[in-house]
Amino acid sequence: MRTKSAVVAGLAVAAALTASVPAVAAPAHHRPRPNCPQLDTNLPWAGDNRARLQKMIDERGTCSGKGGPRPVAAFDWDNTVVKNDITDATLAWALKHDKILRPKSWKDTSAWLTPAADKALTKACGTAVPAGRPLPTSVNTACTDEIFEIREKSQTMAGEPAFAGEWNHRRTVPAYAWIPQLFAGHTPAALTSFARQARAEQLAAPVGTKQTVGTHTIAGYVRYYDQQKDLIGTLKKAGFDVYIVSASSEPIAEAWSGGVGLDRAHTIGIRSITEHGRLTTRLKGCGGVETGRGDALPYMDGKRCMINQEIFKIKGARAWQQQDWSHRIALGAGDADTDVTFVNDATGAHVAINRNKAELMCRAYDDADGRWVANPMFIDPMPRKNGTYPCSTTGATAEDGTHVPVRRADGSIIPDQADRAF
């Protein structure tokens, strides 16, 4: 996807970005360089976050005068670059337009699907439609409800677990893998077409719109964040190599990433194996984790693995490890714990869009390296979290799914943190 000349510059960095929480004053000594790419001063950021990001761009981009390989920036997509969720939008559109093909057996869609979920889906969606043909989900509310409940809550409409078994909770989640698996039988181009049609509807809907999927009520609009679009554009002008790294199916992400000037080669998502040009339920692995049921998605630690493997060309088990500065991103941006590993890997700025997700915000507010940029959502931000984030006890997710303390690189535990970017 890129050459060695595009790898992050330098083991040494001039003047590291200072503290990023809005309550902390920005460095008054920094003066934007007028001939360098500038962030739009008419677009509001919290506190001094724009100045901090501009300082990093000036120091790490083409205006640094250092030359060398291009620095890399990586962004999550949903609720980081846009408001709301493009996978939900695409699935909702597909269900309303009868685009889900009936599998021979629902058990074939996921290795983790429970007998209870198989039974609920078979009962709700029926067997009258031949396998491989579209299910009439636009009129079969029960079928639509079962599919969307499993997507949304990993349970059936009766409240029974939809997935069971063992998986690494920092590398995958079966409900995320299940969406590209649901579209098996379609071509990648068809899935991108579905996403584009959903995109058109979501962008045309007024901010605040809700939609009904079966009996579920979900957001009915998506908007690009102007600030993130401007940040991505400015980074590119300043010589950064910018990528999207999303836990959406890659054909879905590709329908949206062009809106911020990024092409398919710079859009990384869940990658399905194709046969005879059509999607299958098998998903590509990462870092030596085999291709198959979806044990290694671009999810939490899996996003680091995909960045290391696909951008920095680090193969095998090493792709799961944090790399030296010359093989790490300069800027990482995310909104959830699913992004925390790669955002924490950034050497210049860690952008955390606050959706009250514990592990991400614990690290943002602890600001161990002075480079965290915590910012409220740009549209309809979350209210201030009541109480503190449980950083010292249950703020992080372990590989087995248990909740554990959030630890710094040296092993020390981050104390509980109050919400400050709201």
Image (cartoon, helix red, strand yellow):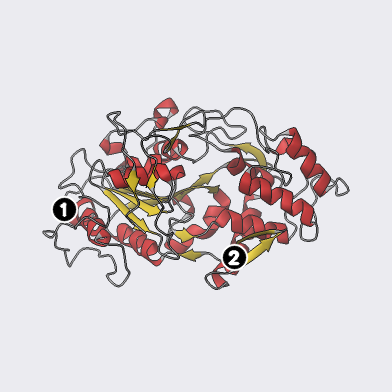
Q: Which is more foreground, mark 1 or mark 2?
A: 2
Under tag 2, what secondary structure? loop
Q: Residue at x 42, y 60 (%)?
A: 383
**Position of residue 98 in the picture relative to residue 420 (left or right):** right
**Position of residue 30 in the picture relative to residue 307 (left or right):** left
Question: Considering only vertical position in the picture, is 374 above or below 307?
Answer: below
Q: How many marks?
A: 2
| Spatial CA span between label 1 and label 2 | 46 Å
In this view of the protein, which residue sits in the foreground, 371 or 276? Answer: 371
The amino acid at mark 2 is Gly
Residue 250 point in image, percent of width and height? 55, 49
Q: Residue at x 58, y 35 (%)?
A: 294
Sequence-wise, the earlier of marks 1 and 2 is 1
Q: Residue at x 61, y 63 (%)?
A: 198
Residue 241 point in image, percent of width and height? 34, 51
Label 1: which residue?
Answer: 65
Question: Considering only vertical position in the picture, is 223 above or below 114?
Answer: below
Q: Quadrant of the C terminus?
A: bottom left
Decide: few, some or many residues near mark 1? Use Cα within 10 Å; few <14, some 14-19, many ≥20.
Answer: few
The amino acid at mark 1 is Gly
Residue 62 point in image, percent of width and height? 22, 55
The disc placed on residue 220 is 2
